[in-house]
Amino acid sequence: MGYEVLDVKPVTRRIGAEVFGIDLGKPLSNRQTAELREALARHQVLFFRDQEMDHDAHKSFGRLFGELAIHSAIPGIEGHPEIVAIHADAESKFVAGENWHSDLTCDPEPPLGSILYMRVVPDSGGDTVFASMYDAYDSLSEKMKVYLEGLEAVHDANPVYQRLFPDLDRKYNRSIHPVIRTHPVTGKKLVFVNPSYTTHIVGLPDDESEAILKFLYVHCMNPNYQVRFRWRPNSVAFWDNRCTWHQAIWDYFPDTRSGFRVTVAGDKPF
Ligand code: SIN
């Protein structure tokens, strides 16, 4: 499908595109929505500038792509359980997404995608980096692809959130997913482990699992598979969580960076 109503400019050949000619604060036409789906499938993360969205518009935009998910570990903002605040300032001890991850792969059905709307950004720093797990997979050797095929890994949120919130006595999600996943829309294979949630590969001795995950993480962090987004106030990033990693760079302390995120529900990886 070609674009008739959107202007989509790739940021790199492999991942990321800026989308122009759209107002996310207004109801979108079927054609605009279809072209956004197409653009997301091609580019994996879409960037928008100068958007004005209230919380309802943000949620309505997300619902064009599926049901909204409630974050399994962090409560939503008052009156909008589907929206989480992404906020850091001089009081912050950590920021969300500081380490490479895909969102909530600890869930049995990890999110399809997330839509982050940034309202306040520091004068410098605070970028988000995204990495294509398609490219990470494609550049593995054929022998490594064969080795990884059929393996499954444990994704556990307990080590992540128990460290961040030691005072809360609660259990978080833990799920098992294939190490190599097939994207349900594009049919392409990709690496589906990440340094935040994946703890080990099922059925391998500990040292082998650790070595393979370490190899994959270093491999997936190759800058050739990445795009780096420089936020401005009122920018939006919409990432396909099924085929990307992302990392929020916290290089702006003690400045403030603040926005809101909705998450679109996904399905069981295969
Ligand atoms: C996140 O992981 O959703 C946070 C990303 C960011 O703040 O840039």
Image (cartoon, rainbow, N blue to C red):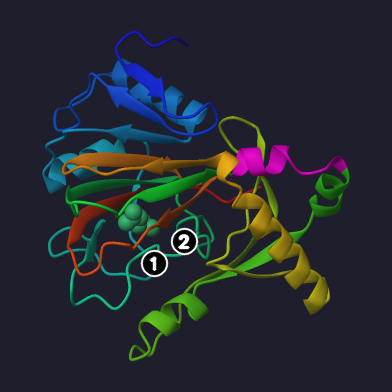
Structural distance between the alpha carbons of marks 2 and 1: 8 Å
Q: Is residue 225 located in the magenta-colored stretch of the structure?
A: no
| Mark 1 neighbour class, 10 Å CA radius: few under 14, some 14 to 19, many 20 or more | few
Total label count?
2
Which quadrant would residue 233 be assigned to in this image? top left
Do the residues bearing badges 2 and 1 touch, measured as CB atoms within 8 Å? yes
The main secondary structure of the magenta stretch is: helix
Counting from the top left corner in percent of width and height, residue 55 is at 14, 48
The reply, left or right, for residue 25 in relation to residue 152 is: left
Q: Which residue is mark 1?
A: 72
Q: Is residue 137 located in the magenta-colored stretch of the structure?
A: yes
Quadrant of the image where one finds ligand 1: bottom left
Task: Indicate if the residue with disc 1 has its beta carbon within 8 Å of ligand 1.
Answer: no
Q: Earlier in the sequence, mark 2 or mark 1?
A: 1
Q: Give the magenta range.
A: 133-142
Residue 61 visible here: yes
Vertical relation: 148 (above or below) 20: below
Badge number at residue 104: 2
Q: Nearer the viewer, residue 63 or 228?
A: 228
| Mark 2 neighbour class, 10 Å CA radius: few under 14, some 14 to 19, many 20 or more | many
Vertical relation: 44 (above or below) 115: above
SS assignment at label 2: loop
Identify the residue shown where x is 48% and y is 35%.
Answer: 44
Counting from the top left corner in percent of width and height, residue 190 is at 65, 43
Badge number at residue 119: none
The reply, left or right, for residue 203 in relation to residue 4 is: right
